[in-house]
Image: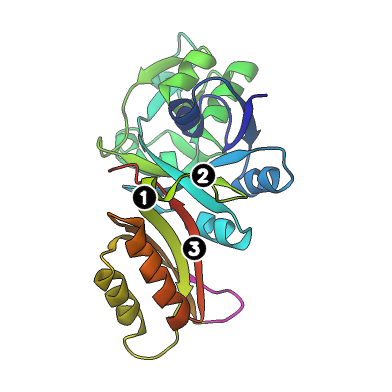
């Protein structure tokens, strides 16, 4: 039986590209139009694993996804970095002069803003997914609509790329996490990265104390993201990624932080994709 992988978006999206690079083609793709729906498919067993974008090198963190992982008790079992290539595509035979609107995911539009400064008459419209927009253009023969999407989408939905690589910053990368409902994936000797969430009290220097413990345990902090705790106004949770050379270093830090902190949770232990 093929592995069932849930993604936000459809075939031809960047999430689909990540699935191909991580798992190959012998999988069942579970297409989801939102990250909430993706999580539901994991929880109800319709998917074995999920692929979720978590941060972009230009646009920053996708903050709601941190909360989705935590509140639904998901486990991060891996990560993947993907270089992002945004291409402007239309029906075959169309040109830039024919475009009245360009539709795409809000993140894609944000990353291509500079390109469209030269085309003030083109209306930019947010849509649910890059590839889904490309598919709809073909299905409905939308001659005046352009899509920003990966070139895989142009191949799948038979569109022309009329302007390739239109992202503002060419070195544009997105980090994706691989999640599932259970954490057992890798032996300890292969694990060299972890994601954790914790809450500190309001005492002066509380966060600094936590970071000092991590440093003393030979953990390298690669990411820190604060997120409001909705039910407790003006209190924040911290989502932190750390790397380490030996799992024992992280084990020691976990023991200390569990004692120190009122709320400490490991969201995932996995292999650093950049090591």
Q: Quadrant of the C terminus?
A: top left
Query: CB atoms at circles 2 and 1 under 8 Å apart?
Result: no
Residue visible at 25% across and 73% down?
A: 216
The residue where tag 2 is placed is: 185
Crowding around mark 3 (Cα neighbors within 10 Å: few <14, some 14 to 19, many 20+) is: some
Q: Which one is in front in this view, the residue at disc 3 or the one at disc 1?
A: 3
Residue 102, given in percent of the width and then of the height, sits at 47, 32
What is the C-alpha distance between the residues marked 2 and 3? 14 Å
Q: Which mark is residue 266?
A: 3
Crowding around mark 2 (Cα neighbors within 10 Å: few <14, some 14 to 19, many 20+) is: few
The residue where tag 1 is placed is: 59
Q: Main secondary structure of the magenta part?
A: loop
Q: Specify start and end residues of the magenta stretch as a single range.
A: 227-233
Direction from residue 86 to residue 227 in the image, left or right: right
Q: Quadrant of the N terminus?
A: top right
Front in this rendered view, residue 35 or 275: 275
């Amino acid at each position: 039986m093929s592995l069932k992988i849930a993604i936000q978006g459809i075939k031809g999206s960047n999430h689909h590209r990540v699935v191909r690079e991580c798992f190959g083609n012998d999988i069942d793709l579970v297409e989801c139009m939102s990250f909430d729906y993706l999580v539901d498919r994991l929880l109800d067993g319709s998917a074995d694993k999920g692929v979720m974008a978590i941060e972009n090198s230009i646009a920053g963190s996708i903050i709601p996804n941190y909360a989705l992982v935590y509140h639904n008790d998901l486990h991060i079992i891996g990560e993947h970095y993907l270089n992002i290539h945004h291409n402007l595509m239309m029906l075959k035979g169309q040109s830039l002069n024919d475009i009245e609107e360009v539709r795409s995911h809000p993140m894609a539009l944000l990353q291509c803003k500079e390109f469209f400064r030269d085309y003030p008459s083109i209306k930019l419209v947010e849509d649910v997914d890059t590839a889904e927009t490309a598919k709809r253009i073909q299905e409905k023969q939308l001659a005046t609509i352009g899509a920003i999407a990966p070139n895989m989408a142009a191949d799948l939905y038979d569109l022309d790329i009329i302007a390739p690589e239109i992202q503002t910053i060419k070195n544009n990368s997105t980090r994706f996490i691989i999640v599932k409902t259970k954490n057992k994936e890798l032996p300890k000797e292969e694990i060299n990265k972890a994601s954790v969430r914790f809450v500190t009290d309001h005492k002066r220097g509380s966060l600094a104390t936590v970071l000092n413990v991590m440093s003393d345990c030979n953990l390298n902090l690669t990411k820190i993201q604060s997120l409001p705790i909705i039910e407790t106004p003006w209190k924040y949770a911290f989502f932190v990624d750390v790397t380490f050379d030996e799992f024992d270093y992280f084990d020691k830090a976990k023991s200390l932080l569990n004692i120190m902190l009122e709320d400490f949770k490991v969201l995932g232990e996995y292999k650093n994709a950049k090591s």
